[in-house]
Image (cartoon, grey):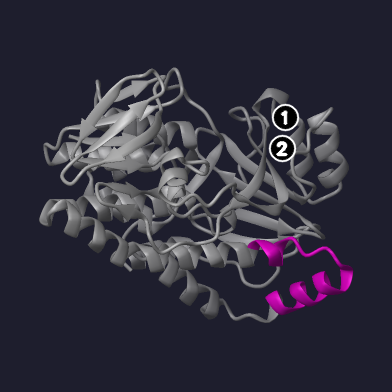
C-alpha cells in the first residue's frame, strides 16, 4: 500500500499512475470534501506528454483550450519582443499547450483515479519510519501503515516540515489576484498574453468554454487584504490595454482569489527511508514560468516509473537523481523571472523593456524547448 498525503494535482496524478499498474493506493486529503476550486492554469507539452503516458491527455485537452500563440506586452498592449508561435513548438515537442480551469483538471484526474481512493477530512500529522514500512498518524487519531508515504501536501507540507524542517515559505515580495470570467462575458483574445508594467503584471489566458482565466500581480506587503477587490484592481489596472478592465469588471467578486506568492529555497534531499516528497512539498516555486502543476505531474510520472522497475529504496534514490536538478533549476528560474517582471524603478523598467525587444525569437524558443521537453 502506498499512502499519499494530499489530493492535489501531483497526488492525484501519482494515484492514476499507480492504479494503472494495479498498485494499492490511498490518498489522505485534509479538506472535508473534494469540490471544484481554484482558477486557471496552462499545461505545457512536458506535462501533456507525461499525462499522455497515463492515458488522460485527451480528456485534459477536451477540458480546456489549445494555445497557439503567446506574447509579452507592455501596459498599452504593445509587444515587448517577438510573439511566440507556441502551436508550432507544441507540434515539435509532440504535445500541445492546454489551458484549462484548475477544477476541470482536478475532475479529470479524480475520475481517472477512480472511486474509493481518496479519504477526505483526514490529514497526516506525522509519520514514523521503520526499515520496511512507514506508519502515519492522522488528524482523526487513526494510524495507517504503508510501504511508502508520498508527501504531496503542498507549500506548507506537514511531511516536509518533519523531513526537512525548513520553517515557513519565503515571501516573494508580491501578491496575486486570480479570476475566471463567466462564459461569454468577454470575447476570448486570440493569444495568451502577459503584460508588464512597473511593479505590476496582468495575464490573460483563454481556457475554453468561452471562459477567460486572468491573473494580476503587484508588489505589496505580505498579508494584504482588499476592502473592495474590484476597486483595488481597477485603480491599478483600469487604464491598461483592453480587455483588462472588462475582465476585472465582469468577474464576480467572490470568484477573485488573492494569494501572496511564496516559494522555498531549493533542497537536494527529498526523501528518507520510506518517505518522499512530490510537487510543491518538494520544490515550491513562484508561478512565473507556468510550471508548478507541470513539475508536479513530471514528479508523479517519474516516481511511478522508478517504483515500477526498482526496489523502493533504489527507486527513491533514482527519482531524486532524475528530478532534483531539473525542478530546482525551474524554482530558481521562476524566482529570477519574477524579480525581472516586478521591477518598479522607471529606469530599470525602461532598460528591461528595451532589452526584451532586442532578444531574438530564436533565443526564447530555444529556452522554451528546454523547459517544455519531457523527458528532458
Decide if residue 108 is on the left or right side of residue 87.
Answer: left
Q: CA distance from mark 2 to mark 1?
A: 5 Å
Residue at horizontal 44 percent and vertical 25 percent from the top:
30
Q: Which residue is mark 2?
A: 247
Q: Is residue 66 visible?
A: no
Q: Secondary structure at mark 2?
A: helix
Residues at marks 2 and 1 touching, judged by CB atoms closer than 8 Å:
yes
Residue at horizontal 53 percent and vertical 79 percent from the top:
363
Give the magenta-colored segment's residue range. 338-356
Q: Nearer the viewer, residue 14 or 104?
A: 14
Q: Quadrant of the C terminus?
A: bottom left
User: Is the residue marked by circle 1 packed among few (<14), some (14-19), or many (20+) residues within 10 Å?
Assistant: some
Q: Which mark is residue 250?
A: 1
Image position, residue 251 (x, y; %):
69, 29
Image position, residue 348 (x, y; %):
82, 73
Image: 146 above or below 53: above
Q: Nearer the viewer, residue 67 or 3?
A: 3
Q: Nearer the viewer, residue 333 or 353?
A: 333
Q: Is residue 75 visible?
A: yes
Decide if residue 314 is on the left or right side of residue 119.
Answer: left
Q: Is residue 348 magenta?
A: yes
Residue at horizontal 36 percent and vertical 66 percent from the top:
373
Q: Nearer the viewer, residue 128 or 157?
A: 128
- Counting the numbered discs, the total is 2
Image position, residue 335 (x, y; %):
61, 62
Image position, residue 65 (x, y; %):
46, 43
Decide if residue 121 is on the left or right side of residue 135.
Answer: right
Q: Quadrant of residue 5?
A: top left
Q: Which mark is residue 371?
A: none
Q: Is residue 250 magenta?
A: no
Amino acid at each position: 500500500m502506498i499512502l499519499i498525503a494530499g489530493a492535489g494535482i501531483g497526488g492525484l496524478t501519482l494515484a492514476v499512475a499507480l492504479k494503472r499498474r494495479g498498485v494499492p493506493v490511498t490518498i489522505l486529503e485534509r479538506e472535508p470534501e473534494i469540490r471544484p476550486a481554484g482558477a486557471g492554469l496552462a499545461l505545457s507539452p512536458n506535462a501533456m506528454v507525461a499525462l499522455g503516458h497515463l492515458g488522460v491527455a485527451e480528456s485534459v485537452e477536451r477540458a480546456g483550450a489549445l494555445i497557439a500563440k503567446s506574447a509579452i506586452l507592455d501596459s498599452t498592449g504593445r509587444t515587448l519582443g517577438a510573439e511566440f508561435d507556441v502551436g508550432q513548438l507544441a507540434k515539435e515537442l509532440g504535445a500541445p499547450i492546454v489551458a484549462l480551469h484548475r477544477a476541470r483538471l482536478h475532475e479529470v484526474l479524480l475520475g481517472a483515479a477512480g472511486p474509493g481512493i481518496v479519504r477526505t477530512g483526514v490529514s497526516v500529522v506525522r509519520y514514523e519510519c521503520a526499515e520496511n514500512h512507514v506508519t502515519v498518524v492522522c488528524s482523526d487519531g487513526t494510524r495507517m501503515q504503508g510501504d511508502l508515504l508520498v508527501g504531496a501536501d503542498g507549500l506548507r507540507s506537514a511531511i516536509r516540515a518533519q523531513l526537512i524542517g525548513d520553517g515557513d515559505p519565503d515571501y516573494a515580495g508580491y501578491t496575486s489576484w486570480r479570476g475566471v470570467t463567466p462564459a461569454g462575458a468577454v470575447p476570448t483574445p486570440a493569444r495568451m498574453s502577459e503584460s508588464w508594467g512597473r511593479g505590476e503584471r496582468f495575464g490573460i489566458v483563454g481556457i475554453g468554454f468561452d471562459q477567460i482565466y486572468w491573473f494580476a500581480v503587484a508588489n505589496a506587503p505580505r498579508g494584504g487584504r482588499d476592502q473592495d477587490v474590484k476597486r483595488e484592481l481597477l485603480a491599478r489596472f483600469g487604464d491598461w490595454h483592453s480587455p483588462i478592465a472588462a475582465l476585472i469588471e465582469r468577474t464576480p467578486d467572490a470568484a477573485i482569489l488573492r494569494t501572496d506568492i511564496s516559494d522555498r529555497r531549493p533542497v537536494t534531499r527529498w526523501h528518507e527511508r520510506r518517505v518522499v516528497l512530490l510537487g510543491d512539498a518538494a520544490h515550491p516555486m513562484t508561478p512565473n514560468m507556468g510550471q508548478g502543476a507541470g513539475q508536479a505531474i513530471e514528479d508523479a510520472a517519474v516516481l511511478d516509473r522508478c517504483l515500477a522497475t526498482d526496489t523502493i529504496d533504489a527507486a527513491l534514490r533514482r527519482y531524486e537523481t532524475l528530478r532534483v536538478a531539473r525542478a530546482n533549476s525551474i524554482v530558481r528560474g521562476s524566482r529570477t523571472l519574477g524579480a525581472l517582471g516586478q521591477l518598479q524603478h522607471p529606469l530599470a523598467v525602461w532598460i528591461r523593456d528595451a532589452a526584451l525587444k532586442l532578444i531574438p525569437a530564436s533565443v526564447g524558443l530555444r529556452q522554451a524547448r528546454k523547459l517544455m521537453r519531457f523527458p528532458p
